[in-house]
Image: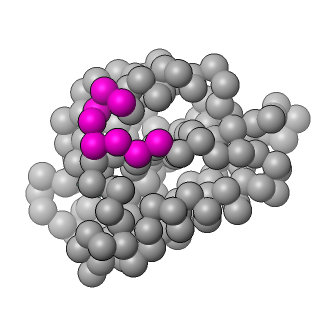
Amino acid sequence: MSVVLLLNGPNLSVLGQREPEIYGTDTLADIEKAVADEVSVRRWNVVSIQSDAEGDLVGAIHKHRGTTVGAIVNPGALMIAGWSLRDALASYSPPWVEVHLSNVWAREQFRHESVIAPLASGVVVGLGAFGYRLAARALLHLCAEDAT
Ligand code: DQA
């Protein structure tokens, strides 16, 4: 059974309540369902991990490195200086897509750089929860059907 790793960083557990004017009203559970719905076309499963601690995300990447077909990663503010997250992703060879709900380019200067983006297969920014669906579709596209 093929599995997609869905990783969400700090403060993303409270989506739906957290600054809904910026991040929307969908909850993390809604997003998990949406990703599962997208990848169900190929009967893939989703393992979803959210943590406010960078080390937990690093551990999850190593744990699931050999057993997942790809990953969707919203690093939250770890985009700015999550160097150990970046190094863990460098050792993760399947395709993975970075997602940000908000258009980080239209926001404060400190959100304009992501230390993980140069390693990503692609980045989806500013499309709200729908961005996770797009990232899931991108993984379906990037993983050849006969490889999964
Ligand atoms: C975010 C953008 C980050 O700058 C912020 O720290 C977040 C959420 C987004 O999804 O728009 O926590 O990653």
Q: Position of residue 34 (x, y in %)?
A: 61, 65
Q: Does residue 106 appear in this view?
A: yes
Q: Residue furthest bottom?
A: 21
Residue at 12% across, 52% down: 110
Q: Is residue 44 above or below residue 30?
A: above
Percent coordinates x, y for residue 11 in the rendering:
27, 54
Q: Is residue 55 magenta?
A: yes
Q: How is the image coloured?
A: one colour
Residue at 26% from the left image edge and 69% from the top image edge: 18
Which residues lie in the magenta part? 49-56
Using the rendered view, name the quadrant where residue 106 is placed. bottom left
The residue lying at 65 percent from left, 31 percent from top is: 68
Q: How many marks?
A: 0
Above or below residue 50? Residue 65 is above
Which quadrant of the figure has residue 108? bottom left
Which residue sits furthest right? Answer: 146
